[in-house]
Amino acid sequence: MKKLILMLLFIPMVIGAATIENPIKSESFTELFEVIIDWIINIALVIAPLIIVYGGFLHITSAGDPAKSSQGKKVILYAAIGLLVALLAKSLIGILEEIVVI
């Protein structure tokens, strides 16, 4: 039974009927890396404002508690730093490509 299944799977490959396409649509590692960075930037552009709003909510609802107010400020600061790093990642690729000849 196993031999029959294996034969049915490999017969189209042997006669050339099946071709395997590249699912990633990238021809080189740098193109793949750029696609991944673009995906991360898009995710960061959606999540960072939500985290900043959450930090503002923590800060506003602290009711005078310095610990919660400080926590809200830290959340806002770290979200802004994370967004900045994500946005600079794209330009960092260009800088590294100029330094290291690929």
Image (tube, rainbow, N blue to C red):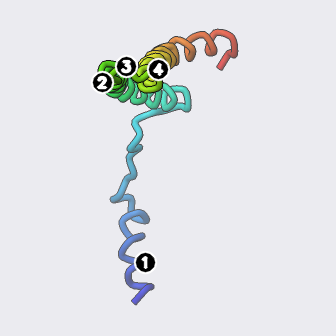
Judged from the image, the secondary structure of the residue bearing numbered disc 3 is loop
In the rendered view, would you say 92 is above or below 31? above
Q: Which residue is mark 1?
A: 6
Q: Earlier in the sequence, mark 4 or mark 3?
A: 3
**Residue appearing at x 47%, y 20% in the figure:** 70
Q: Which residue is mark 3?
A: 64
Foreground disc of the pair 3, 1: 3
Disc 2/disc 1 C-alpha distance (Å): 64 Å
Q: Residue 4 placed where, x, y %?
A: 39, 84
In the rendered view, would you say 69 is above or below 25? above
Foreground disc of the pair 2, 1: 2
Foreground disc of the pair 4, 3: 3
- Looking at numbered disc 2 in the image, what kind of residue is underneath it? Thr
Q: Which residue is mark 4?
A: 70
In which quarter of the view is residue 52 placed?
top left
- Residue 90 visible at all: no
In which quarter of the view is residue 72 placed?
top left
Which mark, residue 61? 2
- Looking at numbered disc 4 in the image, what kind of residue is underneath it? Ser
> In which quadrant will I find the N terminus?
bottom left
**Residue appearing at x 39%, y 29% in the figure:** 39
State left or right for residue 98 relative to residue 60: right
Judged from the image, the secondary structure of the residue bearing numbered disc 2 is loop
Circle 2 Cα neighbour tier, 10 Å, few/some/many (<14 / 14–19 / ≥20): few
Disc 4/disc 3 C-alpha distance (Å): 10 Å
State left or right for residue 98 relative to residue 10: right
Which mark, residue 37? none
